[in-house]
Amino acid sequence: TKFLSYARQIVEQAALLEREYKSAPPPNRAFAVSSQHYAFVVNAFVELVREYGRDKYEFTLRELKTAEIIEDVRTHRSDIGVLYLSRFNREVIRHILQNEELKFESLFTAKPHVFVSRSNPLVGRESVTLDDLKVFPRLTYDQGVKNSFYFAEELHITAESPKNIVVSDRATLFNLLIGLDGYTISSGILSEDLNGSNIVSIPLVSDEIMEIGYIVTTDRPMNDITRRYLEHLRSYIANCTL
């Protein structure tokens, strides 16, 4: 009968769909992080890829300008963004995050350090001052058209510096630190795996504090891969000496 014929077709189609579903490859694992230029972000990313390396995945790591990090997270292009707050920029950045329905979660706080070449005359000192640095080129990251002091990656961006060089990537910055005896101000966390042994971190005499953390949207829950990445990030930071 027609009824039995239709029923048989439905059963056969259901069986076909079940076979196709069972044999279908697993979906790609996806994760994206946008960050200021921090080696520990890269180290944690490496560990995450190693963990999921046997699966299909599509992971993205973008080192960006501060405004672009905020935009990436706001538009869900990235799952999280990594940046810092300080006494100088805290009120402005928090106001922007609130307007964009983003929240900041702290990872750690650090006193500012300067990164210099191992051959720099300052190496060997227990600490340095901003006055000590004036004779050396100051290296900072480009912030593009939104070049507000509040978006700068470096503390004391308004301090007097007669020699200034702006770069767009971490590799160029470290090459110039070595080649020109320049300096940059950061958290003090270095990675010999990524940066080699030619870069040295020296404490900077300063009343400032860097609070480095991550930003996420407030409108959707964090996925498992993002949580796992944060575990790797916290683990790496915990094993570093600040």
Image (spheres, rainbow, N blue to C red):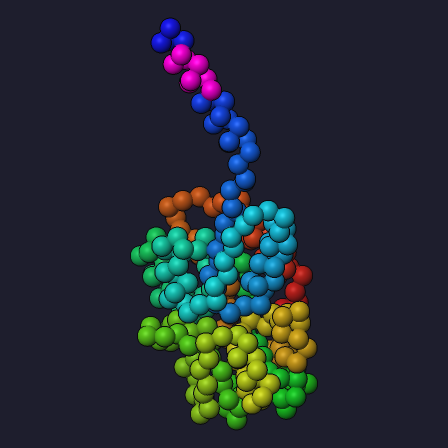
Quadrant location of the N terminus in the rendered image: top left
Give the residue drawn at x 39%, y 59%: 72
Give the residue drawn at x 51%, y 46%: 28
Residue 11 magenta-highlighted: yes
Residue 177 coordinates in the image, percent (x, y):
57, 84
Give the residue drawn at x 36%, y 60%: 71
Residue 215 coordinates in the image, percent (x, y):
44, 56
Number of numbered callouts drawn: 0
Residue 51 coordinates in the image, percent (x, y):
63, 51
Q: Quadrant of residue 187?
A: bottom right
Q: State whether residue 205 appears in this view.
A: no
Write the start and end of the magenta stretch as one range: 5-12
Residue 192 coordinates in the image, percent (x, y):
67, 72
Residue 133 magenta-highlighted: no
Is 23 displayed left or right of 144 in the figure? right
Q: State whether residue 136 appears in this view.
A: yes
Residue positioned most to the left: 99
Is 145 displayed left or right of 118 in the figure? left
- Principal SS element in the magenta part? helix
Give the residue drawn at x 44%, y 14%: 8
**Relative to 146, residue 107 above or below:** above
* Closer to the camera in the image, 212 or 42: 42
**Relative to 126, residue 23 above or below:** above
Quadrant location of the C terminus in the rendered image: bottom right
* Closer to the camera in the image, 216 or 241: 216
